[in-house]
Image: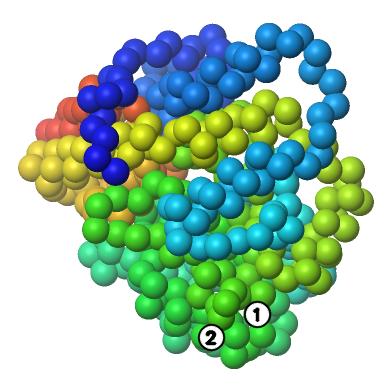
Amino acid sequence: MGNSSAEFDFDQLIARRGTDSRKWDDIGSVFGSEEVLPLWIADMDFASPPAVAAKIRERAGHSVYAYNTRDRAPFSQAIIDWVRRRHDWNIEKEWIVQAPGVVPAIILSILALSKPGDGIIIQPPVYPPFFASIKDNHRNIVENPLISHNGYYEMDFADLEQKLANPDNKLLLLCSPHNPVGRVWKREELTRVYNLCQAYQVDVLSDEIHSDLVYGGHKHTVFASLGTPVCHQSITFMAASKTFNIAGLNTSFIIVPCKQRRGLIETEINRMHLRRNNLFGVLATEAAYQAGEAWLDALLVYLEKNAAMLVDFMEARLPGVKVVKPEGTFLAWLDFRAYFNEANELSKFLVEQAQVGLNPGLAFGTQAAGFARLNFATRQSVVLEAVTRIEKAIKQLDRRGS
């Protein structure tokens, strides 16, 4: 560690409008207003590490962008070194399977390891594509809702065991760290999940895309690392996309220790002719893992300050809006239920009165009515502007109600 955010300028104003940014250029179609301050889709308003931009510029200068090799040794080695260094997990090159993104990788694995009609367990409130990846592929969504203790979420292990014991349920789709509630699951929590899944022979699809975005006092545990020496019933999904803000380059990887399961997933990839990778995504991932560590350490300092500022603001000036400081991710989970019973009313209020664009809670499951997700991976001044807008709008609401 040892690096401070002062070495990198995360307060730099980077104009993103007019760059085909989903987050900024689509707000009119998403929210019905061009005036909202967008803090929704999970990308960052920060420039990627200098080494990443330099690598892309270097390769772009060649001017021939034809088919690239499928297996680039430095790419695999960068992943192996990164996972060992950041997550204390030793993996082998043969375990790594490239994919065009974590969500497509999850879908490919669902297709490979289950059949239509099978149950797949999820833990809502959870990342919206989890629902779609199951339903759209004719599998059954089986919910094991998280339990909230004043905004601090935990797994319901009794209910989870019931769901795992049902032989119709073939897979558990785990979100670790959890989006949107910001939990970094403790090793002992994941060990309980591991033991249950082993007992009932249920494979675990572990989405660990936010694994690098963990704050002080917390440690990410790779689910598959809980095995001895490795869990062969676990598929791990990772990418540099969230960590280094390169999601638009559509590159991720799946780590599959089990040769049989890996073969089934690769069969699906081949069946869909998805073995070609993104030239620039491969190089950007490689550069990020090789030379982006100091940047990431500085980023984490900055993001944690944003999270603390957000929580302090709410506690001091908007105590009716409940939020617990996330342990990981750059996403805050805001509870507006003290003000809104109807989810549609909350969404309308945030857009029309507060003029902020957040993700509506209902997208994360029926348990999340009255909640909204706020992306604080932006300049501190923007986060402050957003919460000030919310404060002003709620005070007007209070005045009208009194």
Seen in the picture, residue 83 relative to 163 is either above or below; the reply is: above
- SS for dot 2: helix
Q: Are marks 1 and 2 in contact (CB under 8 Å)?
A: yes
Residue at x 35%, y 60% (from the top left corner): 219
Of residues 206 and 22, which is closer to you in this image? 206
For the residue pair 113 and 10, the one nearer the viewer reads as 10
Q: Amino acid at mark 1?
A: Val
Give percent across and percent down for residue 195: 52, 85
In depth, the one of 118 and 261 nearer the eye is 261
What amino acid is at disc 2? Leu
Question: Disc 1 and disc 2: Cα gap in Å?
Answer: 8 Å
> Residue sitting at 71 percent across and 42 percent down?
73
Does residue 204 appear left or right of residue 376 in this picture?
A: right
Quarter of the picture containing the N terminus is top left
Q: Residue at x 47, y 15 (%)?
A: 16
According to the picture, the residue beneath numbered tag 2 turns out to be 196
Label placed on residue 202: 1
Query: 10 Å neighbourhood of mark 2: few (<14), some, or many (≥20)?
Result: some
**Residue occupying the point 63% across, 70% down:** 234
Can you give x and y, in whole percent of width and height, for residue 109 in the image? 74, 60
